[in-house]
């Protein structure tokens, strides 16, 4: 659940495409399928997390309509 009024957030938790079949549009198709499913269950926004150094994933998400919205900092304990 989100604290933003009127937002029904879905989260795409993990997305992976086998290296042997990358660059064939499969990732984009999976994202669109996830968005379609999220809409069908009432979500009006979707969130996905990518590690900062994963430029390939960040590019795919941006190309698929996602924008960087928050920055999360993490520390080893």
Image: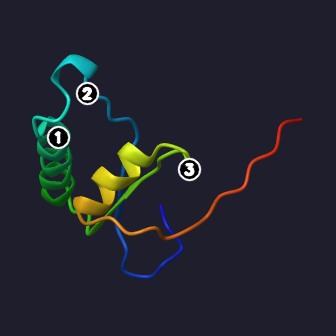
Q: State the separation of the CA atoms marked 3 and 2.
A: 18 Å
The residue labelled by disc 3 is 52
For residue 4, above or below residue 27: below
Residue 76 is labelled as: none
Residue 30 is labelled as: 1
Per the image, label 3 sits on a secondary structure element best described as loop
**Quick one: label 1 or label 3, which is nearer the N terminus?**
1
Q: Position of residue 66 (x, y in %)?
A: 32, 64
| Residue 42 figure quarter | bottom left
Q: Position of residue 40 (x, y in %)?
A: 12, 56
- Residue extending farthest to the bottom is 5
Q: How many marks?
A: 3
For residue 68, above or below residue 56: below
The residue at 37%/74% (across/down) is 7
**Quick one: label 2 or label 1, which is nearer the N terminus?**
2
The residue labelled by disc 2 is 17
The residue at 40%/40% (across/down) is 13
Q: Is residue 62 left or right of residue 42?
A: right
Q: Nearer the viewer, residue 66 or 38?
A: 66
Q: Position of residue 31 (x, y in %)?
A: 20, 47
Q: Nearer the viewer, residue 45 or 69?
A: 69
Instruction: Indicate which label's residue lies in the foreground, 1 or 3.
Output: 3
Q: Is residue 51 left or right of residue 25?
A: right
């Amino acid at each position: 659940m989100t604290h933003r009024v009127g937002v029904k957030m879905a989260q795409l938790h993990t997305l992976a495409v086998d290296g042997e079949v990358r660059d064939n549009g499969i990732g984009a198709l999976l994202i669109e399928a996830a968005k379609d499913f999220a809409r069908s269950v009432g979500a009006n926004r979707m969130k996905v997390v990518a590690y900062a150094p994963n430029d390939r994933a960040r590019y795919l998400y941006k190309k698929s309509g996602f924008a960087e919205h928050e920055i999360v900092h993490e520390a080893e304990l």
